[in-house]
């Protein structure tokens, strides 16, 4: 009988929350903006959470791109005032360039 008593008590002791405790709240994904202006990405490095979206907005008077051949994303040519959005699907560091202006480089850190 002692064994049955302990078996009935121990599972209750191992529980970390009481019956009235709500589950942890889920984080609402955020949207971050990277401005393309003066032949540069601003910010040049951006840290986001998995599930967040990044929007690039071209504010220059000529086209640019947001391209990372390693991870397979490419905005194609973004005309002035055009936007492009990416929602990363894995954690890590994503580095990208403008294929039209190879000196333009940026990094997204996904946590």
Image: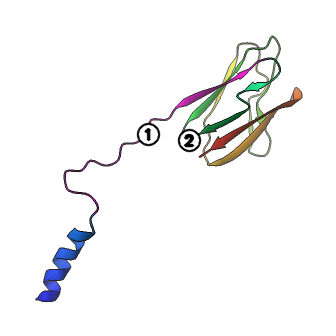
Left or right? Give the position of 6 relative to 97: left
Q: Residues within 10 Å of mark 1 (few under 14, many from 20)?
A: few
Q: Quadrant of residue 108?
A: top right
Towards the viewer: 100 or 103: 103
Is there CB contact under 8 Å for labels 1 and 2? yes
Residue occupying image coordinates x 55% and y 36%: 52
Query: Residue 69 at what x, y percent from top left?
Result: 80, 42
- 14 and 63: which one is in front? 14
**108 left or right of 16?**
right
* Disc 1: which residue: 27
Mark 1: which secondary structure? loop
Percent across and percent down for residue 59 are 74, 14
Q: Residues within 10 Å of mark 2 (few under 14, many from 20)?
A: some
* Quadrant holding the N terminus: bottom left
| Label 1 – label 2 distance at C-alpha | 10 Å
Q: Residue at x 55, y 29 (%)?
A: 31
Is residue 34 on the magenta stretch?
A: yes
Residue drawn at (71%, 13%), measured in percent from left and top? 81
Q: How is the image coloured?
A: rainbow
Measuring 45% from the left and 35% from the top, which residue is drawn there? 28
Q: Is residue 38 above or below residue 55?
A: above
Q: Magenta span covers which residues?
A: 16-37
N-terminal of the pair, mark 1 or mark 2, is 1
Q: Position of residue 8 (x, y in %)?
A: 16, 76
Q: In the rendering, at what x and y percent does residue 11 appear?
A: 23, 72
**Residue beneath disc 2:** 49
Q: Which mark is residue 55?
A: none
Q: Main secondary structure of the magenta part?
A: loop
Q: Quarter-wise, where is residue 17 in the image?
A: bottom left
- Local secondary structure at mark 2: loop
Q: How many marks?
A: 2
Among all residues in the image, which is located at the extreme top? 61
């Amino acid at each position: 009988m002692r064994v049955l008593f302990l078996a009935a008590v121990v599972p209750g002791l191992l529980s970390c929350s009481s019956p009235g405790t709500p589950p942890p709240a889920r984080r609402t994904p955020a949207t971050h903006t990277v401005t393309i202006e003066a032949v540069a990405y601003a910010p040049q490095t951006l840290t986001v959470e998995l599930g967040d979206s990044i929007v690039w907005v071209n504010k220059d008077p000529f086209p640019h791109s947001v391209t990372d051949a390693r991870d397979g994303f490419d905005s194609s040519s973004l005309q002035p005032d055009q936007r492009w959005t990416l929602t990363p699907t894995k954690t890590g560091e994503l580095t990208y360039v403008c294929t039209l202006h190879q000196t333009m480089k940026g990094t997204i850190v996904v946590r």
